[in-house]
């Protein structure tokens, strides 16, 4: 095993929830980065829990501006470095799914169109976690959130999760990957590859949210593993637009979605026919991503 | 028509479109990053800057933005990474930038923008007024207003100097079409002169994003700390008046421009034009000041205060001038619906401590409505009893 690079890890004292999937994924990302990296962070849990002035948990240069504009900010930072003749320093965006799938979408598209040399990491909690678990464009079909509450006339979110990976690929990105917070080595490997890519790259990491998914604080890694095993959120990697075989999905036996759903109270209300719909989504993924 | 004239002081006078004058000046100021999104009537400025880049006449990175929101964010990022950054916009574009504008001043980033002032819809209208600038007047930016091509060019030089001295953003407002699309003779500030005035921008390590000295920028502030930061911006903007005046004086000495013969007082904040003893006074901003100046040649009992710096607002300087005036006409190209008068009127009316002269507010030039010499003459001779008048 490689020597662990702990240089850039978040310092103790951040105020994230116990067992937070996102913070664990962040540590994996940080292990993969050199200390010659500038971080641009969108508004969200990660910003709020790590930068309560005058404290900061960051050892890398770090900038937060607004919710929607992290990618444009990163483009500006990169252009500034380029103009100073610095091609070495890397620029990484960190944002949640709200800042990525929804409010930041236009700006991400602009950055990808310019093919600016920036790695964009989306920590996907499938909801606006920081504001209190409202539905986002990433929320799973059937999930109960505070703006798509399950009820007599509601199955929870009736929208389907937006295909961000597909959107990234449609922009012609040379490196696009998907991972999960419970797989630190997978994250590290993918970030290391992405950061070497010339031009824009995108990594999306499923980061189970303890209060949002209504989990016990020791279940984030476990539920993440189930997301992979069901095919609902496989570990993916696209290089030059082609799905690679490097994925470790093949090591898992495909499981039914039952356990994945039952462990999360956000799906507690679902009836059998709704669950079948979700099983269909998993089946489509298995076919689309050649998981079997 | 001969397009160039070499003046006695070895300065080159050129016949230029306002946008070209601005673009040429900006290029001589050597920004490192330029980003913009096209909107009428700002377009010619950003087209010229793109052309300089294409022709190898500039050193900046030129980033196409997919919206004004992105353009403002790109220059924010560039500035936070320690370089000189510039953008230009208008009207709806400026409003789309609003969230970023507050952020730029809050992060104390010295970016400079040109605003080709234009009306706000609905109803949609592409012509000039000051509604766009007034909508963002509380964003924490220094706001300069130019009355002609030459002043527009010079204010851009001043803008970078003041911005980088105070770590505050500056916008230069120029009337859309009236300045951006018209031709006038201009002396473009030369690089050699600029270098005497504006040193290379090199912020101290530890004040910008750099991996040699990592810092956290844009942390979140709890109630006990937030208000202190906001108060500091308020204080520093007020303090900026001194910096603007001293930078203006220094640049005047380097650039050696002659003031108008009618000019009695000329600072970075405002200019007094007309007879010192005039009992009536007009207060205005932007290109209509040039028209007003023409009228003053006939209307000798009226003078003009041309406001060149709207934020910070030079209320003390204005009060000093108004002491011995009997009648004040405030002409402005914007409204503040639901309040007593226009934004400029409100700024001036609220600054009187005791007695105030008779003040009349004229809302003129909305959405490109012509502000003619006839209209101004009519105002100076009018005995209206109405507080607010639309002409």
Image (cartoon, grey):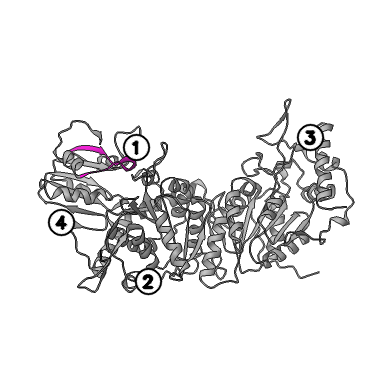
> At x 15% / y 56%, what residue is drawn?
B264
Q: Which sits earlier in the primary sequence, circle 4 or circle 2? A: 2
- Image quadrant holding the N terminus of chain A, namely bottom right
Label 3 – label 2 distance at C-alpha: 65 Å
Confirm whether residue B352 shows in the render. no
Residue bearing the label numbered 4: B264
Q: At which x and y percent is residue B203? A: 45, 68
Instruction: Provide the secondary structure element on which disc 1 rests.
Output: loop
- Distance between the Cα atoms at labels 3 and 1? 53 Å
Q: Quadrant of residue B350?
A: top left
Q: Which chain carries label 3?
A: A
Q: Around disc 4, counting alpha carbons within 10 Å, would you say few (fewer than 14), some (14 to 19), or many (20 or more)?
A: some
Q: Do labels 3 and 1 share a chain?
A: no
Front position in the image: B186 or B353: B186
Q: Which is nearer the N-term, disc 1 or disc 2?
A: 2
Tag 1 and tag 2 share a subunit: yes
> What residue is shown at x 34% (from left), y 46% (from top)?
B128
The region drawn magenta spans B355-372
Residue highlighted by disc 1: B336
Magenta run includes residue B359: yes
Label 3, residues with CA under 10 Å away: few <14, some 14-19, many ≥20: some
Nearer-N-terminus badge (1/4): 4
- Residue A268, numbered circle: 3
- Tell me the CA gap for discs 4 and 3: 79 Å
Give the number of the disc on residue B199. 2
Mark 4, mark 3: which one is toward the viewer? 4
């Amino acid at each position: 095993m490689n020597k662990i690079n702990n240089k850039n890890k978040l310092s103790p004292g951040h105020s994230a929830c116990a067992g937070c999937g996102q913070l664990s994924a962040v540590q994996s990302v940080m292990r993969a980065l050199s200390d010659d990296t500038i971080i641009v962070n969108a508004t969200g849990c990660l910003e709020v829990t790590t930068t309560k002035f005058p404290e900061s948990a960051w050892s890398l240069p770090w900038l937060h501006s607004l919710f929607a504009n992290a990618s444009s900010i990163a483009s500006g930072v990169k252009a500034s470095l380029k103009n100073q003749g610095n091609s070495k320093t890397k620029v990484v965006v960190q944002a949640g799914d709200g800042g990525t799938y929804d409010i930041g979408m236009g700006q991400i598209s602009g950055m990808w169109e310019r093919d600016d040399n920036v790695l964009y990491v989306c920590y996907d909690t499938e909801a606006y976690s920081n504001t209190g678990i409202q539905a986002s464009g990433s929320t799973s079909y059937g999930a109960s959130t505070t703006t798509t509450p399950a009820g007599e006339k509601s199955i929870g979110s009736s929208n389907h999760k937006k295909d961000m990976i597909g959107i990234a690929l449609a922009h012609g990105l040379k490196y696009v990957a998907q991972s999960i917070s419970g797989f630190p080595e997978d994250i590290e490997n993918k970030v290391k590859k992405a950061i070497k890519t010339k031009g824009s790259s995108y990594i999306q990491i499923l980061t189970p949210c303890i209060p949002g998914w209504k989990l016990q604080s020791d279940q984030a890694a476990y539920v993440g593993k189930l997301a992979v095993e069901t095919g609902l959120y496989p570990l993916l990697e696209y290089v030059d637009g082609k799905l690679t075989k490097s994925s470790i999905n093949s090591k898992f036996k495909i499981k039914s979605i039952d356990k994945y759903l039952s462990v999360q109270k956000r799906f507690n209300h679902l009836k059998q026919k709704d669950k079948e719909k979700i099983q269909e989504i998993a089946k489509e993924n298995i076919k689309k991503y050649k998981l079997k | 028509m001969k397009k160039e004239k070499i003046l006695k002081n070895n300065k080159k006078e050129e016949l230029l479109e306002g946008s070209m004058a601005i673009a040429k000046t900006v290029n001589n100021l050597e920004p490192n990053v330029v980003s913009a999104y096209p909107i009428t009537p700002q377009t010619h400025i950003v087209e010229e800057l793109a052309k300089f880049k294409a022709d190898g006449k500039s050193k900046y990175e030129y980033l196409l933005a997919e919206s004004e929101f992105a353009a403002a964010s790109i220059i924010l990022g560039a500035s936070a990474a320690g370089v000189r950054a510039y953008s230009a916009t208008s009207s709806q574009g400026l409003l789309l930038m609003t969230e970023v504008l507050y952020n730029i001043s809050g992060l104390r980033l010295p970016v400079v923008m040109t605003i080709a002032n234009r009306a706000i819809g609905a109803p949609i209208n592409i012509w000039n007024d000051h509604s766009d600038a007034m909508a963002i007047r509380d964003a924490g930016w220094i706001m300069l207003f130019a009355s002609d091509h030459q002043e527009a060019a010079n204010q851009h030089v001043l803008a970078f100097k003041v911005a980088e001295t105070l770590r505050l953003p500056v916008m230069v407002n120029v009337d859309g079409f009236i300045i951006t699309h018209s031709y006038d003779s201009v002396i473009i500030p030369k690089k050699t002169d600029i270098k005497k005035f504006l040193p290379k921008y090199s912020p101290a390590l530890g004040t910008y994003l750099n991996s040699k000295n990592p810092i956290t920028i844009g942390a979140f502030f709890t109630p006990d700390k937030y208000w202190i930061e906001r108060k500091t911006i308020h204080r520093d903007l007020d303090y900026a008046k001194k910096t603007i005046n001293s930078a203006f004086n220094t640049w005047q000495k380097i650039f050696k421009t002659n003031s108008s013969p009618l000019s009695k007082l000329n600072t970075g904040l405002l200019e007094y034009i007309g007879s010192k003893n005039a009992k009536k006074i007009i207060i205005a901003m932007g290109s209509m000041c040039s028209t007003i100046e023409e009228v003053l040649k006939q209307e000798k009992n009226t003078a003009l205060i041309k406001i060149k710096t709207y934020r910070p607002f030079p209320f003390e300087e204005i009060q000093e001038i108004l002491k011995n005036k009997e009648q004040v006409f405030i002409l402005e190209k914007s409204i503040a619906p639901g309040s007593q008068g226009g934004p400029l009127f409100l700024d001036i009316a609220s600054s009187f401590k005791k007695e105030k002269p008779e003040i009349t507010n004229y809302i003129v030039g909305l959405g490109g409505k012509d502000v003619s010499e006839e209209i101004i003459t009519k105002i100076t001779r009018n005995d209206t009893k109405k507080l607010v008048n639309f002409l």
